[in-house]
Image (cartoon, coloured by chain):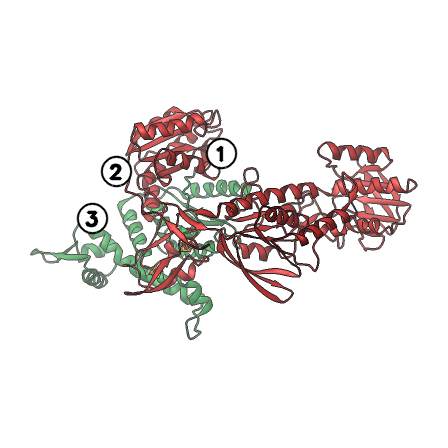
Chain colours: A green, B red
Amino acid sequence: MIRIIRVMCTGRVDPAFVVWALANEFDAVLVVGCRIGDCHYSSGNLAARRRMRILQAFIKKNGLPPERLRVEWISSAEATKFSKLVEEYAGQVKALGPMQKDDGTRLRLLAMKRALEEEKVRWLIGNEKKLVEEGNVFGDKLDQERFDAAVLGALEDEFNKNLIAVALEKAPASVPELAALSGLKEPAVGEYLVALEQAGRIAPVAGHEEYARYTKI
Amino acid sequence: MPDEVTQKEAAPDPGAPRIGVFVCHCGANIAGFVDIEAIENHARALPNVAFTQRNLYTCSETGLREIKTAIAAQKLNRVVVASCSPRTHEPLFRSACREAGLNPFLFEFVNIRDQCSWVHMQQREGATRKAKELIQMGVARAALLEPQEDITVGVAGKALIIGGGISGITATMSIARRGFQVILVEREKELGGILKNVHKLYPTMGSAGDLIGKNIRAVQKMPRVQVLTSARLVEVSGFVGNYKVTIDSEGKRIEDTVGVIVVATGARLLTPEGLFQYNGRNIVTQGELELLLKQGRLDADSIVMIQCVGARVPGREYCSRVCCMTAIKNAILIREAQPETAVFVLYRDIQTYGTLYEEDYRRARELGVSFIRYNLSKPPVVSSDKVIVHDELLGEDVPIPFDLLALATPLIPQAGFDELSKALKVPVDENGFFLEAHAKLRPVDFATDGIFLCGCARWPSDIGESVSQALAAAARASIPLSQGHVKVEPIVSQVDQNRCIGCGLCETVCSYVGIHLTDTPKGKKAETIRASCKGCGTCGASCPQKAIRMSHFTDGQIEAQICALVGTDK
Ligand code: SF4
Ligand code: SF4
């Protein structure tokens, strides 16, 4: 069965909401808006479509089935189509099985959400149309593949950083511990720690252990 | 000043949440399919819930009184109603809150009828659980709701009517008679629309030319009316009360500001290219037959009419509603004028609803018109001077020679409907007809405030129906015009200028000029134009700095709703 959350327009759907739902008891998210070209808010669904496409790629890259997010465009006059869609998708989600609920998965989902809230990522996602279709002031356009690579690269970077940040919010940890938890190499963990420390988000814990431990501020 | 926007001081903080949850039985509509008591008990145990009550019909006088009493007696500062659809009932419950002194935006709607009892009629247990959880999510959101004050916008006392057929002319005259200025825009060189080509009108058998001619002359003489022919709407921006429109009329650009817009663009008849050997000579459309009758050029001893040509077929499923009566009317006229002419109507179903129309059907049969039923799976086969029809009732093929074959083709959407739909930001249905806000409750309104529709632009309708709709649309459109101001929903974006870095992304993604960059002492910063912002939230979900807060749909409210079920047993 589905639980419905009403928003004014699919344009309101922040990718972070989708990940937040997966981190909180929902096994899948269906984003439904007006038909493309028929948006009640003119073009909100186009912005949503671009965002959700990237989000789906990001979800997949993080080892989750991309089908956990589905995006459909249906007019409010197409009730039958909507009910068929929901039935079919519910079946598909059942086949996928429930989301993993272990601490590790939740930590990763929280880091994904944070990554989607990062300025650089949002700037790139929000400017897709401009960068790919219109080009910069010099008329240089990015092709779709390069754009996708840039966004997904930025997302991964922010994800790794935030994974360390959320882990430290739970409990102080050392570089090797964080490396084990995140699957990153120790020097990479070190770099993210420096960045987080510079941003004033974490600090080393005073102590005499072999490895410095860090904690959130 | 039409574009002045006023807003009262921000409403006071309602304080720590004391939520009242009202669960509606909706007679048996809800209570008959879920365990309503269990639902109320579940709601009572939720955080911040101070009061719960079940109502037989929450929307009835009694139900609304119960809400108001509880707000006062229980000092409720948030109200959740779990009942039907916000689409139809939200305004009602909001005003009940307002009457009890509670800001209407501290009200939250949970739909446990359409979303639970109706769709899961056979699954009592599941529907009950779903209702509980939806209420739980609604309560979580309600706790974070904030009061909002209405925004009031002035209304320009002028209307724009698009389309100069009978609907548009009627609407124009009705609004002008109330004392408002009206601009009537017609695409063609002359007013009149489709009626110009019609001979007689059913059921009165009056002359269409007389009717439309009288109306054209009347509207042209009318004070306060500006008629623009060979004209089309080029651009629209703005919002209810203040639509800035650009019209191209005979090559001249005209700019104006109107308070309301009525779409009366009508429909056109399908040309049956490739169907039943249509050739425009002896095989014509019912519309072309109409012209022959009008011009007195009809000369035939045997006339066959085929109904539902290109209508009620895969790909165009709808019934065009006027074709049966048009065929019957023309058949009557022909048989009355020249009884020696044989008339055959090959039909699939006859739709002559109501008293007068059914009477005409009877009269046509009395006059000797032969009605022969065919089936879509065995359509009539047409050669140059003969139709072979498989008579459904006799079960055999009947050959009928003809001098003239008239094909009843449906009314289809006007060319260019999609451009108009985009320019006005109003929807069309899957056939391309304009879609009203609600088929029953708001039949001549668009969902967009200040834009209305009538006549065949909405759906094939005959003259009587088009005129009723035009009068209705004119009456609806006159409400904001005569009030002189409208209230705009205060669901808008709000910029935290301390976080905003002036990147301008919000302005780029907004399709309403709802937000723009302005110069401030701290450099360029985004600012909402409250009367233009529609509250869609696209800017909020895009802002890199998360500097935009969407009122009534804040990140916090939505995220609370999403995670409200954590820890609930599934
Ligand atoms: S998108 Fe955000 S940061 Fe950029 S101008 Fe708009 S409000 Fe400011
Ligand atoms: S909420 Fe929508 S309409 Fe309002 S400023 Fe943002 S994008 Fe524009």
The amino acid at mark 3 is: Lys
Mark in front: 2 vs 3: 2
Q: Of marks 2 and 1, which one's residue comes earlier in the chain?
A: 2
Task: Evaluate whether residue B236 shows in this view.
Answer: yes
Which residue is label 3 attached to? A170
Most foreground residue, B511 or B46 = B511
In the rendered image, which quarter is residue B525 located in?
Answer: bottom left
Image check: B282 left or right of B259? right
Residue furthest bottom in the image: A138
Q: Ligand 2 within 8 A of label 1's CB?
A: no
Image x and y of residue B426, in percent: 54, 51
| Helix, strand or loop at mark 2 | loop
Cα distance, mark 2 to mark 3?
29 Å
| Helix, strand or loop at mark 3 | helix
Q: Residue at x 66, y 59 (%)?
A: B229
Which residue is label 1 attached to? B119
